[in-house]
Image (cartoon, rainbow, N blue to C red):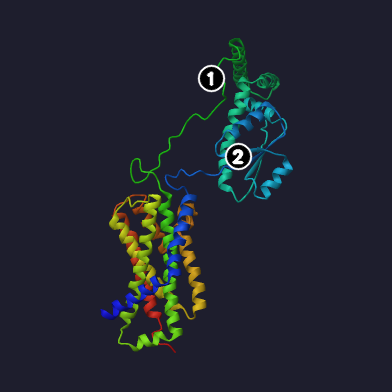
């Protein structure tokens, strides 16, 4: 054990003596985790989000088109600006606007007729940036509600709506293709609208009828974020610090493997092999020292997150420690596998960086995996970082018990064993 502990002490001393590497290992993940945590909601998920820029081209100039623009501008998620068609196309093409809505000529009149008689519906042209599909869906939903409310308000209570109702009544009476039963129903409907308008005239302009605001959504939503308990707000920094910790610890493990290759090039490996040290001592000491360094990095990151951003371990503390320890061991065995499979330092650094970035990306360290397509979500179960992120999320903001940490710990230990076996079988113990 004395040589074994001496080798571990040597690795730790080299790590802490390299001030530049130590600072990079601590400050860079802290800075990136803070940025991504703020970007994806921060504490409580209440961070201010930027509005979606929407340009509106009003070619109609009717009461309905003006009311529609007012309705859209009142939505807190949209930044509505007037524009011309050519200018809007250029702005969307350059990425300065997410979408542009073109209100065609006679839209108000045609929409009113379509509301009562099912006549051909006018089209609203929607120009959009294809890189903003998520925002496009939101804009279309807001637009549909705004159109329905604005058109119904004008048709039932507006001055131009009365003309449309009278025109629609004439069309119903003069259209022989409408069955008698439907003609009577439409006549009663339009006559009721006329009666409603006449009653409002008798009550005066200040009369507040049931339809004064137009048709609106017949429901409201009650939003409740499901976290670890009642009155416990979601803290987005928990995920971002876990993700950045996973990424930079994997880079540290990669450096462990490259350091072994450098030992070969410098001749120090031959001296270690000449010493009375077994293979278990040489490889085991590197595994333990790398695991301790990984655990230290996680300790610093989550301590900083706890003090500065209020990240707490709301689930099982033993489960959190178990996930951290299993991931640290997996990282160490990954570093040894890098050294075993590498031929030269330059080539090894290239493919190991690529492998690390793929594991980080597919594991949900940068963005949560629920954003991925369904087929990719299923595929990522074979990526060890996915289990590490699920375990850290479960033990921090989700507040899950130790039983939820068993599967991530088991899978990470399985990958540790797999990477370790590859390292032992492929490692060149003798230098040519």
Image: 17 above or below 402:
below
Residue occupying the far left of the picture: 1
Q: Quadrant of residue 60?
A: top right
In this view, the residue in front, 387 or 19, is: 19
Look at mark 2 in the image and give the residue it sits on: 79
Quadrant of the image containing the C terminus: bottom left
Q: Residue at x 40, y 39 (%)?
A: 224
Look at mark 1 in the image and give the residue it sits on: 210
Give neighbour class at mark 2: few <14, some 14-19, many 20+ (Cα, 10 Å).
Answer: some
Q: Quadrant of residue 323?
A: bottom left
Q: Position of residue 4 (x, y in %)?
A: 29, 78
Quick one: SS at disc 2?
A: strand
The disc label shown at residue 135, or none? none
Q: Is residue 364 visible?
A: no
Report whether 166 appears left or right of 384: right
Q: Position of residue 177 (x, y in %)?
A: 68, 25
């Amino acid at each position: 054990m004395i040589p074994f502990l001496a080798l571990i002490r040597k690795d730790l001393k080299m790590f802490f003596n390299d001030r530049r590497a130590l600072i990079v290992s601590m400050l860079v993940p802290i800075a990136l985790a803070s940025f991504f945590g703020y970007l994806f909601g921060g504490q409580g998920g209440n961070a201010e989000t930027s509005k979606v820029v929407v340009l509106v081209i009003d070619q109609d100039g009717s009461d309905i088109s003006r009311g529609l623009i007012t309705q859209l501008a009142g939505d807190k998620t949209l930044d509505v600006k007037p524009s011309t068609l050519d200018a809007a196309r250029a702005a969307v093409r350059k990425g300065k606007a997410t979408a542009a809505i073109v209100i065609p000529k006679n839209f108000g009149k045609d929409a009113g007729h379509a509301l009562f008689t099912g006549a051909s519906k006018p089209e609203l042209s929607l120009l959009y940036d294809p890189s903003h599909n998520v925002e496009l869906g939101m804009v279309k939903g807001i637009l549909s509600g705004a159109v329905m409310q604005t058109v119904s308000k004008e048709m039932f209570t507006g001055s131009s709506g009365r003309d449309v109702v009278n025109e629609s009544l004439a069309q119903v009476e003069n259209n022989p293709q409408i069955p008698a039963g439907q003609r009577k129903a439409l006549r009663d409907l339009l006559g009721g609208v006329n009666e409603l308008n006449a009653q409002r005239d008798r009550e005066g302009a200040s009369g507040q009828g049931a339809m004064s605001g137009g048709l609106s959504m017949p429901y409201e939503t009650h939003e409740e974020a499901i976290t670890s308990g009642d009155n416990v707000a979601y803290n987005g920094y928990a995920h971002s610090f876990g993700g950045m910790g996973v990424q930079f610890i994997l880079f540290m493990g990669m450096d462990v493997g490259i350091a072994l290759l450098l030992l070969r090039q410098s001749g120090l490996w031959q001296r270690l092999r000449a010493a009375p040290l077994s293979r278990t001592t040489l490889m085991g000491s590197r595994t333990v020292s790398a695991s301790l360094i990984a655990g230290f990095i996680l300790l610093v990151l989550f301590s900083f997150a706890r003090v500065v951003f209020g990240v707490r371990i709301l689930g099982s503390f033993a489960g959190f420690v178990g996930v951290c320890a299993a991931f640290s061991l997996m990282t160490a065995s990954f570093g040894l596998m890098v050294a075993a499979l590498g031929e030269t330092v330059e080539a090894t650094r290239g493919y190991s960086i690529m492998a690390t970035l793929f594991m980080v990306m597919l594991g949900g360290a940068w963005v949560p995996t629920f954003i991925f397509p369904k087929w990719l979500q299923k595929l990522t179960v074979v990526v060890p970082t996915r289990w590490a992120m699920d375990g850290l999320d479960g033990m921090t903001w989700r507040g899950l018990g130790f039983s939820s940490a068993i599967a991530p710990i088991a899978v990470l230990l399985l990958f540790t064993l797999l990477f370790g076996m590859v390292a032992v079988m492929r490692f060149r113990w003798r230098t040519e």
